[in-house]
């Protein structure tokens, strides 16, 4: 009887979670995408971990020259290694695990809404919208079919946010330790998650929870110790998050650049002929030199990155495994859902600010802080993923608010969101018209 009651009370939620799982799994098994570029590197590192060679990518070179430390990680590679250790080197096991993580992420988003809006009479409906938007987002379904970090780190990020709001409701020592543990793991999976930690510290300071703050920081640092110690032993440098971050500062900030990925010949030569520790130092040196000698160029690149981050004309789907009508269809669906997410997500953000809904202020802080590091380093379409679960919550909040309005299309916050999204997309189109034409030439 309890199981039957649970099903009756959560029928829509279960449909969403099972649907998200099956959609991701079906996409993975239908396309069976072979790992390439970053995915191939993660796959190789994971196999080397299983074989006992350690966190290495290229065993033909000395560890000081090995680029594994410059990859995003290390937690995702160890996640893959754990799967390979148990099930062997089979991508099917990874696809199954990642489909499960997507479904769990959608569930955690639903639970997070219930925590944040505990006194809202339509909190379940808001949570269902947020879970569905995240669960059936085309880009996230596609990326779960690849050996890429996004599905794994988004799960840990959503878990981290859930634990934080659970801690806000009941600020005990066990949840403080859980917050430190989940924060440490999320950062080891994707270092930019580190920028959410100031919000946690602010809350602990504001509420004067000194014992919980101490425990949070202690557990957080303990999580970082093994990886930091390993890197110091090898490279004689403190690298608690690897070396990928430093190099991005150099890649994204150079004269004549566009703020996106793309190595110059000078960078490629330096990368191939120097040790990782030297690349780490040179990257920061080059960035500081660029910042001091070309401050206006840096401001220009930052503005370009902000424009591209929120641009509607930069959907996912330009991958190697698809081509022709199928790829075009995916790109169009990606763009359409992106417009929906950002229009209604931004609408929800504006609505929360206008209505001074303090329940959403911490979530708003996470949303503002999430893209900041990308604005000053490198922007790519998939680097926007971390903001998707946050905007999904705001979108659900906004949609439910609009339900009660007869002439909902006249809502000022909705109009403002539409104007900003369209205007930003048009600006990006004007600034990158040649590249846009090149992309269109793939299909016409």
Image (tube, helix red, strand yellow):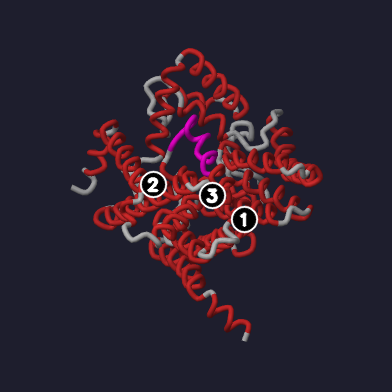
Q: Residue at x 49, y 31 (%)?
A: 377
- Residue 226 appears in view: no
Q: Is residue 300 above or below residue 4?
A: above
Q: Residue at x 41, y 63 (%)?
A: 27
Find the distance from the CA under tag 2 to the CA under tag 3.
Answer: 14 Å
Mark closest to the chain's N terminus, 2 or 3: 3
Label 3 element class: loop
Find the distance from the CA under tag 3 to the CA under tag 1.
Answer: 19 Å
Magenta span of residues: 367-379
Tag nearer the camera, 1 or 2? 2
Q: What residue is shown with label 3?
A: 357
Q: Is residue 259 above or below residue 310?
A: above
Of the numbered discs in the image, which one, if any, rests on residue 104? none
Looking at the picture, how far across and down is residue 324, in whole percent? 25, 54
Label 2 element class: helix
Q: What residue is shown with label 2?
A: 413
Q: Quadrant of residue 252?
A: top left
Queried whether the magenta region covers residue 391, the answer comes back as no
269 relative to 167 in the view: left or right: left
290 relative to 210 in the view: left or right: left
Most common SS among magenta residues: helix
Queried whether the magenta region covers residue 374, the answer comes back as yes
Looking at the picture, how far across and down is residue 227, in whole percent? 70, 41
User: Label 3 neighbourhood size at 10 Å, few (<14), some (14-19), many (20+)?
Assistant: few
Mark closest to the chain's N terminus, 3 or 1: 1
């Amino acid at each position: 009887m309890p199981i039957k009651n649970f099903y009756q009370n959560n029928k829509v939620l279960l449909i969403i979670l099972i649907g998200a799982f099956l959609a991701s799994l079906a996409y993975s098994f239908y396309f069976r995408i072979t790992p390439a570029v970053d995915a191939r590197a993660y796959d190789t590192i994971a196999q080397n971990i299983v074989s006992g060679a350690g966190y290495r990518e290229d065993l033909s070179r000395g560890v000081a020259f090995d680029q594994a430390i410059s990859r995003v990680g290390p937690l995702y590679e160890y996640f893959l290694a754990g799967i390979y250790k148990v099930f062997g080197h089979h991508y099917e096991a990874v696809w199954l695990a990642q489909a499960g993580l997507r479904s769990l992420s959608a569930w955690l988003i639903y639970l997070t809404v219930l925590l944040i809006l505990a006194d809202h009479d339509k909190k379940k409906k808001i949570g269902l919208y947020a879970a569905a938007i995240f669960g059936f987002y085309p880009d996230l379904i596609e990326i779960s079919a690849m050996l890429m970090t996004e599905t794994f780190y988004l799960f840990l990020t959503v878990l981290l946010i859930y634990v934080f709001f659970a801690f806000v409701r009941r600020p005990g020592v066990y949840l403080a330790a859980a917050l430190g543990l989940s924060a440490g793991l999320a950062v080891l999976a994707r270092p930019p998650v580190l920028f959410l930690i100031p919000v946690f510290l602010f809350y602990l300071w504001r509420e004067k929870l000194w014992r919980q703050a101490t425990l949070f920081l202690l557990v957080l640092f303990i999580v970082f110790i093994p990886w930091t110690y390993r890197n110091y032993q090898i490279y004689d440098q403190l690298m608690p998050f690897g070396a990928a971050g430093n190099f991005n500062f150099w890649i994204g900030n150079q004269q004549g650049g566009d703020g996106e990925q793309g190595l110059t010949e000078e960078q490629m030569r330096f990368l191939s002929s120097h040790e990782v520790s030297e690349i780490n130092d040179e990257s920061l040196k080059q960035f500081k030199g660029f910042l001091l000698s070309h401050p206006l160029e840096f401001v220009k690149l930052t503005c370009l990155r902000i424009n591209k981050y929120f641009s509607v004309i930069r959907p996912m789907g330009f991958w190697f495994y698809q081509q022709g009508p199928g790829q075009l269809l995916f790109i169009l669906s990606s763009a359409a859902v992106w417009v929906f997410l950002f229009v209604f997500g931004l609408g929800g953000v504006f609505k929360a600010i206008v209505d001074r809904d303090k329940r959403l202020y911490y979530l708003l802080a996470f949303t503002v802080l999430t893209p900041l590091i990308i604005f000053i380093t490198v922007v790519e379409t998939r680097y926007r993923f971390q903001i998707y679960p946050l905007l999904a919550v705001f979108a659900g909040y906004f949609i439910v608010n609009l339900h009660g309005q007869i002439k909902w299309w006249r809502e000022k916050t909705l109009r403002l969101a539409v104007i900003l999204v369209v205007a930003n997309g048009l600006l990006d189109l004007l600034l990158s018209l040649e590249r846009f034409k090149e992309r269109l030439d793939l299909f016409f």
